[in-house]
Amino acid sequence: MKWTRCVIPLLVVCLLTAACGAQQPQEPQPGQFVFTRENFPRLDGSTSTVPLGQAIASVLLGESREDVSDLVQFSKTTQSYRNLMNGSADLLIAAEPAETIWEEKEAQGFDWEMAPFAVDGLVFLVNADNPVDSLTTEQIQKIYTGEITNWSQVGGEDREIVPFQRNATAGSQTAMIQQVMGELPLMDAPAEYVRGEMGDLIEAVAAYDNSPAAIGYTVYYYAEDMEMADGLKLLSVDGVSPSDETIRSGEYPFLNNYYVLTAAGLAEDDPAKVLYDWILSEEGQRLVAHEGYVSVLDVGTEASS
């Protein structure tokens, strides 16, 4: 599949091959908006949206992913919101912020424009050799409050459960607290069971003590589409397996949006506003889907030519 000229209301010119190798942009027509390195918005966001940020910059600038990597140095979820508010970022593609960010926004009187562009699921991972294939929400809650401590209590082997967590400012940790735990307190995990990077958590669950004792959580996109789950399996929750279909339909229980954000009140021809609108357009949503995210619009993965 090959990306060609994108005809959208704001007429952005973009080209991309399926392998994301850059081509020279076609000559713009009068009235078309063309992104350049000089006017390209300063991007920031979550770890799990780095691949999308690279794809967006590659498409709109006509450069390879490698060449645009300097434009996609994301600060992770919590800090990216702070960077938007302090003026050091122009546009975010990020998971929902922690409650502290909403409080800081209110205190600063900052106003942003925010809309979901993709939906994701918080998924639970175990070693592929673990015989447990499914957990209920209540079982997951009890594992992470410390009430359930052995896999035999949930239909598995007589083996201690080792529950990994993310760091407090991670988007997946926010999702875990808000969507799964609710008012229930997460147990205080030993430092060695808390991982600051998604990849580290996934690797730790896969390799812990060369046994299927561990469990952890991440977002569906990161586990499935970045092929980070080798040697692992995704658990069904309340009998529903995470997939593109069950996440988009809302059947899977733990859902979280990815958002695109800019400062409120930007002019329609401001580059950040142009990019914001493009990501939400049908053409932008096709790129979102092409990159393996579950787009808000059910557009498939074929770009128009």
Image (cartoon, rainbow, N blue to C red):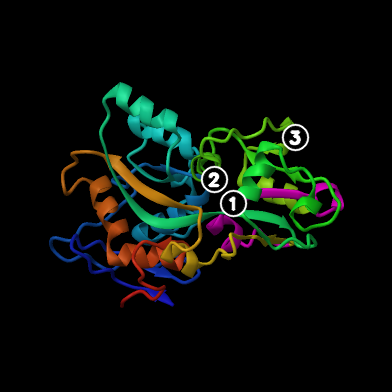
The numbered mark, 2 or 3, whose residue comes first in the sequence reads 2
Question: Position of 220 compared to 118: left or right?
Answer: right
Q: Label 3 near label 2: C-beta < 8 Å?
A: no
Q: Secondary structure at mark 3?
A: helix
Image-quadrant location for residue 123: bottom right
Graded by Cα atoms within 10 Å as few (under 14), some (14 to 19) or many (20 or more), the crowding at tag 1 reads some
Q: Secondary structure at mark 1?
A: helix
Residue labelled with disc 1: 137
Query: Does residue 87 appear in this view?
Result: no
**Eyeballing the image, is 243 above or below 209?**
below
Residue labelled with disc 3: 192
**Eyeballing the image, is 302 above or below 116?**
below
| Region rendered in magenta | 208-230
Query: Does residue 236 appear in this view?
Result: yes
Q: Based on the picture, tell me whether residue 215 belongs to the magenta stretch.
A: yes
Residue labelled with disc 2: 180
Identify the amino acid type marked 1. Thr
Graded by Cα atoms within 10 Å as few (under 14), some (14 to 19) or many (20 or more), the crowding at tag 3 reads few
Q: Residue 87: horizontal and vertical position, in percent?
A: 33, 30
Front position in the image: 82 or 271: 82
Identify the amino acid type marked 3. Glu
Q: Residue 300: horizontal and vertical position, in percent?
A: 40, 73
Q: CA distance from mark 2 to mark 3?
A: 22 Å
Q: Based on the picture, tell me whether residue 20 belongs to the magenta stretch.
A: no
Identify the amino acid type marked 2. Val
Front position in the image: 296 or 134: 134
Q: Quadrant of the C terminus?
A: bottom left
Graded by Cα atoms within 10 Å as few (under 14), some (14 to 19) or many (20 or more), the crowding at tag 2 reads some
The numbered mark, 1 or 2, whose residue comes first in the sequence reads 1
Among all residues in the image, which is located at the extreme left? 30
Image-quadrant location for residue 240: bottom right
